[in-house]
Image (tube, grey):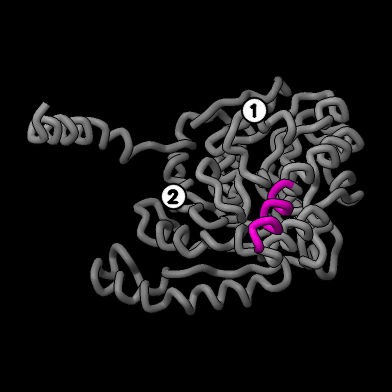
Amino acid sequence: MSKGIRGKIAMKLVEKSLPARMSADCMGGLPDGLHVVMIGTGAPLPDPGRSQPCVGVIAGGRLFIVDAGEGAASAMNACAIDPGRIDCVILTHFHSDHIGGLPAVAIQRWVSDSSQGRLRVLGPKGVRKVIKGLNRAYKLDSDYRAAHHGETVAPREMAGMTAERFDAGSKLESEVILDEDGVKVTAFVVDHAPVDPALGIRFDYGGRSVVISGDTTYTESLVRASKDADLLICDALAPNLVKLLEDAARDAGKPGRAKIFADVPDYHASPAQAADMAREAGVKNLALTHIIPPLPLKGLEGPFLGDSKERFTGPLWLAADGDIYSLLPDGSEIKRSQV
Ligand SMILES: [Zn+2]
Ligand SMILES: [Zn+2]
């Protein structure tokens, strides 16, 4: 086939698919309930199969985002999530893999046709400092875009983000940070030392509940906060696989890299610890996310999970980017689908 014909076919295909892509809306066809979209299930280690941490929670027709790691805006686009529809972003802590994607999400929201004001970012102590710094770093960018597209499309006063601080993690161990129209959101302390504050987030809506662990090792506070939850979404690091990376880094003459691999297992949950916390909390379903290390071969999932399926006998999933978990008010089993 000549290049000319191939080009014409490609143009036709793009033209045909664009209307659907332009109006795609993940939230559009969802029934009333509590829905979780796994936007990014990776971690700081570069992983071609996973974007950095970002979870979308849809409750009562409102869209909440928990964390926005690097690539969050592209990952939202892949999930047909319009940043203009975001109610607020909730940050669990300020590690780069949880905040690195915020500026791009804020820009996409700013110029979105469905935008409803500046992007609100809720977080523990430190959130004002982080957001002020990011707003400052992107001020020139928003000035250029306002000058180019005009104040109607890109109004200067709507650029950037607004920080809203809550007290969980500093003054309180646990705090209801939102309780409106049947949607309750609770932030609670987890153990990601030396990172402080570090929080997990629980959502309750329509009699169903989802807990997002944030980054944590085994901790009683997560067990308490997850009591009888329908779904726990827990960070997971496989120490046996990370040990391979540590040894390989040392053998390659990279002692600094080896030290980092040796340090990280003490502040993330292993799959076995995640399973223990889920079992002790009486959680009904467990999804592992924040997958460390990357799993380039399907066969590595077994060694990654280890004996976690014996420790927690309920449904246990390794989350993938684009997974949707739907919890309906009728109490039925969680419906899993892909965007
Ligand atoms: Zn972290
Ligand atoms: Zn992290």
Tell me the quarter of the image containing the N terminus: top left
* Circle 1 or circle 2, nearest the eye: 1
- Cα–Cα span, label 1 and label 2: 28 Å
Instruction: Report the number of discs.
Output: 2
What span is colored magenta in the figure?
244-253
Few, some or many residues within 10 Å of mark 1 (<14, 14–19, 20+): few
Pick the front one: 4 or 126: 4
Query: Under tag 1, what secondary structure?
Result: helix
Say whether residue 116 is visible: yes
* Image: 136 above or below 48: below
Q: Position of residue 7 (x, y in %)?
A: 13, 36
Position of residue 189 relative to residue 256, above or below, is: above
What type is the residue that disc 1 sits on? Gly
The majority secondary structure of the magenta stretch comes to helix
**Left or right placement of residue 15 versus residue 56 in this view:** left
- Label 2 sits on what residue type? Ser
Mark 1 touches mark 2? (CB < 8 Å): no
**Along the horizontal axis of the image, is 4 left or right of 49?**
left
Q: Earlier in the sequence, mark 1 or mark 2?
A: 2
Which corner quadrant of the image does residue 68 belong to? bottom right
Q: Position of residue 181 (x, y in %)?
A: 65, 45
28 and 46: which is toward the camera: 46
Which residue does the image show at 71% across and 38% down from the upper left?
Answer: 288
* Rendering quarter of residue 287: top right
x and y percentages locating residue 143 in the rendered image: 33, 76
Residue of label 2: 74
Q: Which mark is residue 336?
A: none
Drawn side of residue 174 relative to residue 87, left or right? right
In the depicted view, which residue is nearer to us: 186 or 276? 276
Please rate how many residues cluster around mark 2, counting C-alpha atoms within 10 Å: few if below 14, some from 14 to 19, many from 20.
some
Name the residue tied to disc 1.
299
On the question of residue 189 being in view, the answer is no
